[in-house]
Amino acid sequence: MPFQDHFSTQSDIYRQARPTYPDELFAYLNSLCKNHDCCWDVGTGNGQAAVSLAKYFKKVIATDPSAEQINNAMATNGVEYRVASAEQSGLPDESVDLITAATAAHWFNHELFYPEALRVARPNCTLALWTYSSASITPEINELMEWFMYTYLYDYWPDGRWYVRQQYSTLPFPFQKITSPDFYCNINWSKQQWLAYVCSWSAYTRHRQQTGADALQVLLPRLNELWDNTEVKSVRWPLHLLCARLKSL
């Protein structure tokens, strides 16, 4: 299956407008690893997770099939960015201690990715895949965004998005899962920051490409009633984490 590029056209806004992952998540992943020489961050996008992982590993190899995403990634000591797919990493056999995919695994060809993960995994390597689902702001805004995302933009989401909608409960994962704590992304945002996030969605971009219209013009009349231009609101995304030990000794 060829690479389906959903984000290169908005790679710059993607870097600026996506929520950050909590430090507690990376500390937890670190605690699962017996060795900390090398981490492979798959589908790294702008490198957000890779930068945090570099605090715990001697080297992070961060790959993404989109050259545009790699060009917009955050340069950080200890992180090496490469253009490569999840299914063909180019990494040596048994070379990594942790494999991560931050809000990316729903785009992979799982039948090819998992054998690749097993190939590059060292003994006792940990595999960690996570995503965040719909944000919580206020009950009224949550209801509006639910309609906007999954009624108005329903036909414009790529297929992999439905794994996110189902909180990774249906994502193929042929390994013994490790029971993990709950984690959340929490951030305080203005309405303009929230709208920038909406503009980074693949469905928003596809809608605009296919219709020539700006979907925000449908959203804004009601959102403006619920969110003042000067108001900062707390935004909270639940994380859904799948972890497993590969090649356990």
Image (cartoon, rainbow, N blue to C red):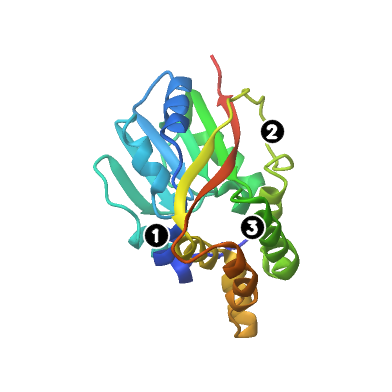
Q: Earlier in the sequence, mark 2 or mark 1?
A: 1
The image quadrant where one finds the N terminus is bottom right
Count the marks.
Answer: 3
Instruction: Check disc 2 and report the residue beneath it.
Output: 174
Amino acid marked by disc 1:
Gln
For residue 156, side relative to residue 19 (left or right): right
Q: Position of residue 39 (x, y in %)?
A: 40, 35
Instruction: Check disc 3 and report the residue beneath it.
Output: 141
> Which residue is nearer to you in this view: 196 or 139?
139
Q: Position of residue 132 (x, y in %)?
A: 58, 45
Q: Earlier in the sequence, mark 3 or mark 1?
A: 1
Q: CA distance from mark 2 to mark 1?
A: 34 Å
For residue 83, side relative to residue 178 (left or right): left
> Which residue is nearer to you in this view: 91 or 81?
81
**Quarter holding residue 145:** bottom right
Q: Position of residue 227 (x, y in %)?
A: 55, 62
Q: Which mark is residue 51?
A: none
Dot 2 alpha-carbon crowd within 10 angstroms: few under 14, some 14 to 19, many 20 or more: few
Amino acid marked by disc 3:
Ile
Residue 160 visible in the displayed image = no
Q: CA distance from mark 3 to mark 2?
A: 37 Å
The vertical placement of 164 against 39, above or below, is below
Instruction: Check disc 1 and report the residue beneath it.
Output: 16
Nearer to us: label 3 or label 1: 3
Residue 80 visible in the displayed image = yes
Secondary structure beneath dot 2 equals: loop
Q: CA distance from mark 3 to mark 1?
A: 22 Å
What is the residue that sits farthest to the top in this orientation?
Answer: 249
> What residue is shown at x 37% (from left), y 58% (from top)?
70
Q: Position of residue 219 (x, y in %)?
A: 63, 71
What is the residue that sits farthest to the bottom in this orientation?
Answer: 212
Nearer to us: label 2 or label 1: 1
